[in-house]
Amino acid sequence: MSKAEIFNTICTEIKKISENDTLNLTPETVIEEISDWDSLNNVDLEMALETECKISFEVGEFEELTTISQMATALEKKVN
């Protein structure tokens, strides 16, 4: 997967979980600053990305990723 594909996958999953297709997401978006985002959404996002990208995160690894860019970089390392 290219970095652009990974970014799009992350954004798609965030929009599904938040049930908001109008979110304006950028690589610099801080996940916790998304309106109505909570820790359960974060767990849902982690599980969705693991399933979609066929990877797994170590315990506590995903929680350290605060921006979409950080998530994309971590995913890129795992899928490629």
Image (tube, rainbow, N blue to C red):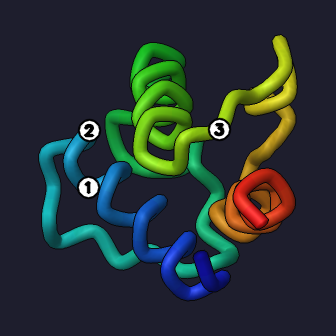
Q: How many C-alpha atoms fall within 10 Å of the one at disc 2: few (<14), some, or many (≥20)?
A: some
Which residue is at a point 60% across and 67% down the rendered structure image?
29
Mark 1 and mark 3 residues within 8 Å of each other at the beta carbon: no
Which residue is at a point 55% across and 41% down the rendered structure image?
54
SS state under label 1: helix
**Nearest the camera: 1 or 41?**
1
Mark 1 and mark 2 residues within 8 Å of each other at the beta carbon: yes
Q: Amino acid at mark 1?
A: Lys
Q: How many C-alpha atoms fall within 10 Å of the one at disc 3: few (<14), some, or many (≥20)?
A: few
**Quadrant position of residue 68:** bottom right
Which residue is at a point 54% across and 35% down the rendered structure image?
50
Q: Amino acid at mark 3?
A: Ile
Q: Which residue is mark 2?
A: 17
Q: Which residue is mark 3?
A: 55
Between discs 1 and 3, the one toward the N terminus:
1
SS state under label 3: loop
Q: Which residue is mark 1?
A: 15
Which residue is at a point 25% across and 42% down the rendered structure image?
18
The answer for how far apart the CA atoms under marks 1 and 3 are is: 20 Å
**Residue depth check, mark 1 versus mark 3: number of the one nearer the observer:** 3
The answer for how far apart the CA atoms under marks 1 and 2 are is: 6 Å
Residue 6: percent from the left, percent from the top? 55, 71
Mark 2 and mark 3 residues within 8 Å of each other at the beta carbon: no
Residue 64: percent from the left, percent from the top? 85, 34
**Nearest the camera: 73 or 67?**
73
Between discs 2 and 3, the one toward the N terminus:
2
The answer for how far apart the CA atoms under marks 2 and 3 are is: 19 Å
**Nearest the camera: 76 or 14?**
76
**Quadrant position of residue 57:** top right
SS state under label 2: helix
Q: Amino acid at mark 2?
A: Ile
